[in-house]
Image: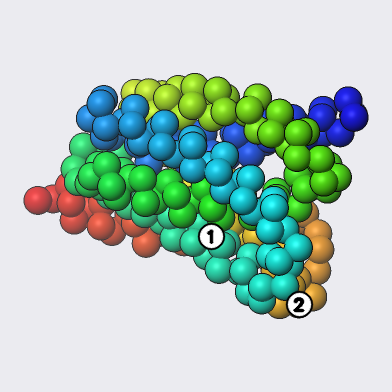
Amino acid sequence: MLQALLAIILIDLSLSADNALIIGLVARDLPPEHRRRAIVVGGALAVLFRVVLTALAAVLLTIPYLQLVGGLALLVIAYRLARPGAHDGEASPSATSLRGAIWMIAVADLTTSLEHVLGIGGAAQGDIVLLVIGLAISIPIVLAGSGFVANIVGRFPWLIWLGVLALVWTGLDLFMDDRAIHPLIPDHWAIDVAFTALAVILIFVFTRPRARIASGR
């Protein structure tokens, strides 16, 4: 039981880091009172999705193209975070509204949870008590980590690209692990790195012209 609990905690810590990063990046430009609300709601949704998706793990395996869609969703979120205005004080995906921020956080929470849900379910071996204990330990990490990320990125806007890199890596991992895609692509870390680098470069290229136009206004 102790070994299973430690495994769940380690997996949840990994999930917590992903969720804290996303929540912090999306909420960073909201007013302080809205930022706190977005972080609390985002953290609660992250935990809820993990519980629900773990319970439905067997069903998720039968849904075609689910990981493919989840991966694409994370790539879209990465692009939106990198758009001009995401770190220069203009209207941006993170600053439009509390509702918009929570919606983006919910989509990101759902898709990042897909990657790890089967690992959590396997480690728990059907023991709901172990699952709940592991999740309870991760909750404060998500909440505290989200606030830390939001504050740090607010002071050092260039760090947004580390978040973009993390989202792209996770999104492509989901995409390439989909049952329809995985047999078509050799399983090697160099391929993962190459696709991730290409995607980040494309995001940079497609967002920079808009940045020049915005700066010229």
Dot 2 surroundings within 10 Å: few (below 14), some, or many (20 or more)?
Answer: few
Left or right: where 208 falls relative to 111: left
Q: Which amino acid type is marked by label 2?
A: Leu
Task: Say which residue appears at 49% left-offset and 51% top-offset.
Answer: 108
Q: Which mark is residue 184?
A: 2
The answer to which quarter of the image holds residue 189 is: bottom right
The quarter of the picture where the N terminus appears is top right
Q: Which mark is residue 20?
A: none
Q: Is residue 79 visible?
A: yes
On screen, residue 200 above or below 68: above
Q: Can residue 197 be seen in this view?
A: no
- Residue 9: percent from left, percent from top: 74, 30
Q: Distance between the residues labelled 2 and 1?
A: 19 Å
Task: Say which residue appears at 51% left-offset and 56% top-offset.
Answer: 74
Left or right: where 122 falls relative to 117: right
- Residue 46: percent from left, percent from top: 53, 42
The answer to which quarter of the image holds residue 149 is: top left
Residue depth check, mark 2 versus mark 1: number of the one nearer the observer? 2
Task: Say which residue appears at 19% left-offset and 43% top-offset.
Answer: 90
Instruction: Specify which label sits upstream in the sequence, 2 or 1.
Output: 2
On screen, residue 82 above or below 10: below
On screen, residue 27 above or below 84: above
Q: What element does badge 2 sit on?
A: helix
- Residue 171: percent from left, percent from top: 58, 57
- Residue 61: percent from left, percent from top: 73, 67
Dot 1 surroundings within 10 Å: few (below 14), some, or many (20 or more)?
Answer: many
Q: Which amino acid type is marked by label 1?
A: Ala
Task: Say which residue appears at 52% left-offset and 65% top-offset.
Answer: 72
Left or right: where 202 falls relative to 71: left
Circle count: 2
The answer to which quarter of the image holds residue 7 is: top right
- Residue that badge 1 annotates: 199
